[in-house]
Amino acid sequence: MTVAEHYTYRVRWSAEDESYVATVAELRSLSWLAPERSEALDGIVSLVEETIADLAANGESVPDAIADRSYSGQFVVRIPPETHRRLALEAAEQGVSLNRLASSRLAG
C-alpha cells in the first residue's frame, strides 16, 4: 500500500471542460481530466504516485495523507471583539459554553 492510496481524492464534472476533473487535497496543484469518472480517478492516482516518486527521488518532503494525520481538536480563530461579545452573550442565553456554541456552529 502506498501513501497515495490514503490521499483525499475528489472527482467532479466540469461543464467548462466537458470532462470529469479529479483532484487531490494533499497536492493541490495536481489535477486530471477525463471523459469518464473512473478514468479521471485512475489518472489522478497515477499522477500522484509519479509525483510522490519524484519528490522522494529529489529528497523533497512528501505530504502526509490528511487521513493519517493526528488532530488535537483545538485551533485558534481570531474574530472581531463585537462578534466575540455577541457569541458569548448567545452562549450565556443558551446556557452553554462559548466553546460548545462555536463547536456546534462549526459542525453544523
Image (cartoon, rainbow, N blue to C red):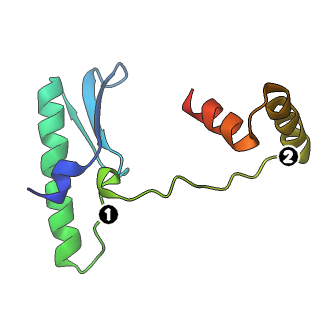
Name the quarter where the C terminus is drawn.
top right
Q: Quadrant of residue 10?
A: top left
Give me the residue at 30% from left, 73% from top: 61
Q: Quadrant of residue 35?
A: top left
Q: Is residue 102 left or right of residue 73?
A: right
Whether residue 49 appears in this view of the structure is: yes
Name the quarter where the N terminus is drawn.
bottom left
Q: Which residue is mark 2?
A: 80
Which x, y percent locates residue 98?
Answer: 75, 41
Query: Do residues under tags 2 and 1 come within 8 Å of each other at their CB atoms?
Result: no
For label 1, the SS is: loop
14 and 102: which one is in front?
102
72 and 40: which one is in front?
72
Q: Amino acid at mark 2?
A: Pro
Which x, y percent locates residue 101?
Answer: 70, 34
Mark 2 vs mark 1, CA separation in Å: 33 Å
Give me the residue at 31% from left, 62% from top: 64
Could you tell which of marks 2 and 1 lies nearer the N-terminus?
1
